[in-house]
């Protein structure tokens, strides 16, 4: 029997970028073992965490993600030897940059989840979902996406003056 | 405005006596190495069309070596001309380049990235008391008021490792580190305040890409930000694309940037790009003990890894 699904005011959208060898298999294991985890997470499969470009994370936020998870093999388990170790450095730097431009790092989670860790996948996803739910929607990037530099309207005295001067 | 030369009320003139001696030394050396065939071209500076300005020049004729100059208006980082993106210059054979300390850091970086070979170039290093910041009036003397922000905190006034180092450094005053103070101010803000700060800054960006074109490390033949199938970063100057572009730019230069601040100098919209560069440099130093220097390193901090790298942020 499934537990009664709780209704929430806000269902966050979470995008998970995962590597195919470990975390994807781990999530699959969680599924085949019939473990329950929030359906808020949309899983995108990559060959390796080393293939996950920081620009994908930006894209996810721009297109409406409220939280992002990046997950791959534990150090030493990488199918390509060291892709995850390169990624570890890259994402450490990327976090620093995002923090500097003012993104709340609580919206971005990194984890190592192996093919045998279905339970860990459930924990990571559940915790992230609940954290983001408490934080509310991610507005910053969405606001940028909907904002135009100039709407075409002569809405300010400066613009009107500039227009008259033409 | 942010990166326009600080108009400090107590702008005192700086000792610029070294520039004339440096100019002489550059001319003499350029003439010598062009005549004896050590190099086929010298990349340096010559006087610009307007008084008090300079522009990059490529001299191939020893008789024209007297056109070369060095002055506080020699702002350009000429390392740009030696990247593979500018194949025509390097194709000519061994090339000499006039390089300030900060430019030499860029040369070292390019060598580390196998863009350049040390034996292919002849470095005429110059002793540099500083160059003018953007917004300085042409022809006005160099003062503590119109000095470029990067020069206030320069650690490479006298570069090491050049084939020849021209000039001797005059004594320079201690200057307030304006940029470091700005960094500290940003660090003290809340994330929301920082977001508001950068959103305002980036909203001015017109996506002219001058910051990319001038950077010695932006030598990719196909920039990610120009691709449209699929499009990774929106290419029009709208807020979303601007934010993404600046994050991507800072990220792609992390661990590579030489801190020459050329990107910030050329920005027509006065966006303080070097703050982002400095932030990444700081991260690289704190996390991986890496600092851009005058000696080439084969692998930059984001091109290698260690087994015990920090992973406290990973669950
Ligand atoms: S940073 Fe240093 S070497 Fe570069 S222009 Fe300024 S004073 Fe000269
Ligand atoms: S990013 Fe800017 S400061 Fe860094 S190397 Fe490029 S032009 Fe110079
Ligand atoms: S130079 Fe300035 S305006 Fe031009 S693309 Fe770079 S940041 Fe934007």
Image (cartoon, grey):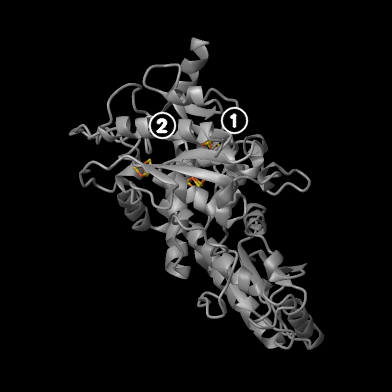
Dot 2: element: helix
Q: In which chain is the residue bearing label 1?
A: A
Residue farthest to the right, as pictured: A32
Residue B293, position as x, y percentages in the image: 44, 56
Residue A50 lies in quadrant: bottom right
CA separation, marks 2 and 1?
Answer: 58 Å
Image point (39%, 58%), residue name: B190
Using a 10 Å C-alpha cutoff, classify the residue at mark 2 as few (fewer than 14 neighbours), some (14 to 19) or many (20 or more): some
Q: Which chain hosts label 2?
A: B
User: In the depicted view, which residue is nearer to us: B102 or A97?
Assistant: B102
**Left or right: A14 in relation to B32:** right
Q: Residue furthest front?
A: B36
- Secondary structure at badge 1 equals loop
Q: In this view, does B64 lie above or below B125?
A: above
- Cβ at disc 1 under 8 Å from ligand 3: no
Towards the viewer: A55 or A136: A55
Marks 2 and 1: which is nearer the front?
2
The answer, for residue B238, to whether it is visible in the render is: yes
Question: Where does label 1 land, which residue?
Answer: A151
CB-based contact (under 8 Å), mark 2 and mark 1: no
Label 1 CA crowd tier, 10 Å (few <14, some 14–19, many 20+) = few
Q: Residue B208 carries which label?
A: none
Q: Name the quadrant containing residue B211.
A: top right
Q: Is residue B39 above or below residue A31?
A: above
- Tag shown at residue B28: 2
Considering only vertical position in the picture, is B300 above or below B124?
below
Residue depicted at x 65% and y 82%? A74
Residue A160 percent across, percent down from the top left: 49, 18
Residue shown at the point (35%, 30%) measured from the top left: B24
């Amino acid at each position: 029997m499934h537990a009664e699904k709780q209704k929430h005011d806000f269902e966050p959208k979470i995008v998970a970028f995962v590597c195919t060898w470990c975390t994807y298999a781990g999530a699959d294991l969680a599924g085949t073992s019939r473990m329950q985890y929030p359906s808020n997470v949309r899983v995108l499969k990559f060959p390796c965490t080393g293939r996950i470009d920081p620009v994908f994370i930006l894209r996810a936020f721009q297109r409406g993600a409220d939280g992002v998870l990046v997950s791959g093999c534990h150090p030493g388990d990488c199918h390509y030897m060291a892709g995850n170790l390169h990624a570890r450095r890259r994402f450490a730097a990327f976090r620093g940059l995002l923090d500097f431009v003012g993104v709340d790092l609580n919206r971005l989670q990194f984890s190592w989840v192996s093919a045998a860790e279905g339970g860990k996948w459930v924990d990571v996803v559940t915790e992230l979902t609940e954290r983001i739910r408490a934080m509310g929607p991610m507005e910053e990037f969405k606001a940028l996406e909907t904002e135009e530099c100039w709407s075409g309207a002569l809405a300010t005295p400066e613009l009107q003056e500039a227009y008259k001067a033409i | 405005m942010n990166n326009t030369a600080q108009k400090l009320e107590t702008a005192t003139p700086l000792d610029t006596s070294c520039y004339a001696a440096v100019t002489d030394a550059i001319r003499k050396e350029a003439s010598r190495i062009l005549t004896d065939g050590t190099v086929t071209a010298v990349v340096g500076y010559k006087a610009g069309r307007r008084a008090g300005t300079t522009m990059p020049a490529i001299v191939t004729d020893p008789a024209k070596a007297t056109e070369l100059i060095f002055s506080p208006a020699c702002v350009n980082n000429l390392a740009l001309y030696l990247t593979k993106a500018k194949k025509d210059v390097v194709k000519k054979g061994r090339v000499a380049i006039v390089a300030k300390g900060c430019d030499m850091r860029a040369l070292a970086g390019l060598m580390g990235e196998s863009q350049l070979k040390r034996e292919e170039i002849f470095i005429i290093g110059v002793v540099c008391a500083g160059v003018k910041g953007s917004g300085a009036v042409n022809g006005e003397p160099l003062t503590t008021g119109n000095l470029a922000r990067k020069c206030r905190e320069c650690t490479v006034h006298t570069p090491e490792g050049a084939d020849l180092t021209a000039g001797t450094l005059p004594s320079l005053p201690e200057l307030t580190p304006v940029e470091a103070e700005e960094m500290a101010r940003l660090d003290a803000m809340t994330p929301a305040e920082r977001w508001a700060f950068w959103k305002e800054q980036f909203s001015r960006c017109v996506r002219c890409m001058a910051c990319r074109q001038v950077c010695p490390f932006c030598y990719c033949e196909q920039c990610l930000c120009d691709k449209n199938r699929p499009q990774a970063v929106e290419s029009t100057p709208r807020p979303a694309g601007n934010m993404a572009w600046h994050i991507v730019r800072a990220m792609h230069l992390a661990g590579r940037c030489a801190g020459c601040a050329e990107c910030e100098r050329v920005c027509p919209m006065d966006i303080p790009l070097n703050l982002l560069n400095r932030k990444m440099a700081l991260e690289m130093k704190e996390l991986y003990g890496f600092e851009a220097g005058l000696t080439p390193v084969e692998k930059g901090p984001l091109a290698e890894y260690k087994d015990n790298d920090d992973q406290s942020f990973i669950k």
